[in-house]
């Protein structure tokens, strides 16, 4: 019998893991797995547990939000032989689930985790140390994901992010940034920059099918937003983003395997929705097809 570790973050979302856990475990049993369940208590538990368990299990399935998935991947990246990875999303925005085509219904997601097919997933490395699954970003609103209180996220869902973002609008700051990517160099004032391996970030930025995002091509999508000079320009910028216009006066979308950012003063970053620290320089490297992710057939 194959061995599966179910790694649960009990604090994610609204604690929905409590509902239907028996059916989820039966689902894994019917798929031929002997399942062990373990819980995280605090940030940093998931990487440690995943790294320690990697050699003992055929598959690790994490239950939680995108941060839990990112931490689990970070743990797996510390070992050479990585088990297959499943994901049952129970966070607030679940951008990774949307990108991977996973159901927000726990039992359906568990069925995919047990019976799906593997998708080789690119993983990002930040400054040679940390890892990220779907986004590393700086600038406007990047603090929202990890500074919005968890109880507000649980109660209000995406509305909590929007309300906190609106509160920060009067304090938008721009940063001179040098961006070195595979095909060239850009220098400008930006209010936001994101290195993405996803089709959705915070439920607001969505890259349509026409953009051609691939999670296994060894390339990041790099989204840069220039500083608007007036309220009217800010309105045009928001319109461009909501209309998925990523090559305008305000918004630029690039593709690159690696990308380096240089600033004149330390800038705060977020990685997979968690605090990524403050840096004068950031190098994001794409590690192609690093993790085998369980997805629905045909995804």
Image (tube, rainbow, N blue to C red):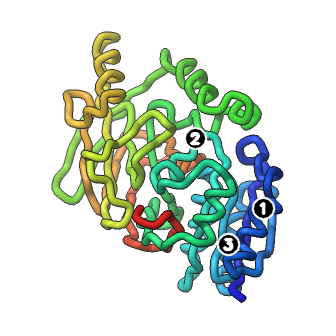
Of circles 3 and 2, which is in front?
Answer: 2
Q: CA distance from mark 3 to mark 2?
A: 23 Å
Identified at 65% across, 32% down, the residue is 157
**How far across and how far down the image is residue 233, in percent?**
28, 16
Which SS class for mark 1?
A: helix
- Is residue 266 depicted above or below 197 in this figure? above
Q: Which residue is mark 2?
A: 93
Residue 291 in view: no
**Closer-to-camera residue (183/262):** 183
Q: Which residue is mark 1?
A: 23
Which SS class for mark 3?
A: helix
Of circles 1 and 3, which is in front?
Answer: 1
Q: Which residue is mark 3?
A: 50
Q: Are marks 3 and 2 in contact (CB under 8 Å)?
A: no
Q: Quadrant of the N terminus?
A: bottom right
Q: Earlier in the sequence, mark 1 or mark 3?
A: 1
**Closer-to-camera residue (278/31):** 31
Q: Are marks 1 and 3 in contact (CB under 8 Å)?
A: no
Q: Is residue 199 left or right of residue 83?
A: left
Residue 226 occupies quadrant? top left
Q: Earlier in the sequence, mark 2 or mark 1?
A: 1
Of circles 2 and 1, which is in front?
Answer: 1
Mark 1 burial class by Cα count in 10 Å: few <14, some 14-19, many 20+: few
- Is residue 263 depicted above or below 36 in this figure? above
Q: CA distance from mark 2 to mark 1?
A: 24 Å
**How far across and how far down the image is residue 113, in percent?**
61, 67
**How far across and how far down the image is residue 141, in percent?**
50, 31
Mark 3 burial class by Cα count in 10 Å: few <14, some 14-19, many 20+: many
């Amino acid at each position: 019998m194959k061995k599966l570790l179910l790694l649960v973050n009990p604090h994610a979302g609204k604690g929905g893991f409590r509902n239907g856990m028996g059916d989820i475990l039966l689902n894994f049993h019917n798929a031929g797995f002997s399942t062990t369940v373990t819980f995280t208590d605090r940030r940093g538990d998931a990487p440690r547990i995943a790294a320690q368990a990697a050699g003992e299990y055929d598959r690790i399935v994490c239950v939680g939000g995108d941060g839990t998935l990112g931490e689990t991947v970070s743990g797996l990246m510390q070992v050479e032989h990585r088990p297959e990875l499943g994901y049952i999303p129970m966070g607030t925005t679940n951008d990774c689930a949307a990108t991977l085509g996973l159901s927000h219904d726990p039992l359906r997601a568990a069925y995919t985790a047990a019976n799906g097919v593997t998708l080789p997933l690119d993983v990002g490395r930040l400054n040679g140390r940390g890892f990220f699954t779907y986004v590393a970003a700086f600038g406007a609103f990047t603090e929202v994901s990890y500074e919005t209180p968890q109880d507000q996220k649980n109660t209000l869902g995406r509305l909590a992010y929007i309300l906190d973002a609106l509160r920060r609008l009067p304090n938008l700051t721009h940063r001179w940034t040098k961006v070195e990517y595979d095909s060239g160099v850009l220098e400008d004032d930006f209010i936001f920059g994101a290195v993405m391996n996803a089709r959705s970030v915070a439920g607001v930025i969505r890259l349509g099918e026409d953009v051609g995002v691939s999670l296994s091509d060894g390339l990041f999508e790099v989204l840069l937003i220039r500083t608007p000079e007036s309220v009217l320009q800010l309105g045009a910028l928001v319109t461009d983003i909501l209309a998925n216009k990523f090559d305008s006066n305000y918004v630029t979308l690039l593709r690159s395997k690696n990308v380096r950012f240089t600033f004149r003063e330390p800038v705060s970053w977020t990685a997979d929705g968690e605090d990524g620290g403050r840096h004068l320089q950031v190098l994001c490297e794409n590690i192609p097809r690093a993790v085998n992710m369980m997805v629905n057939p045909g995804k």
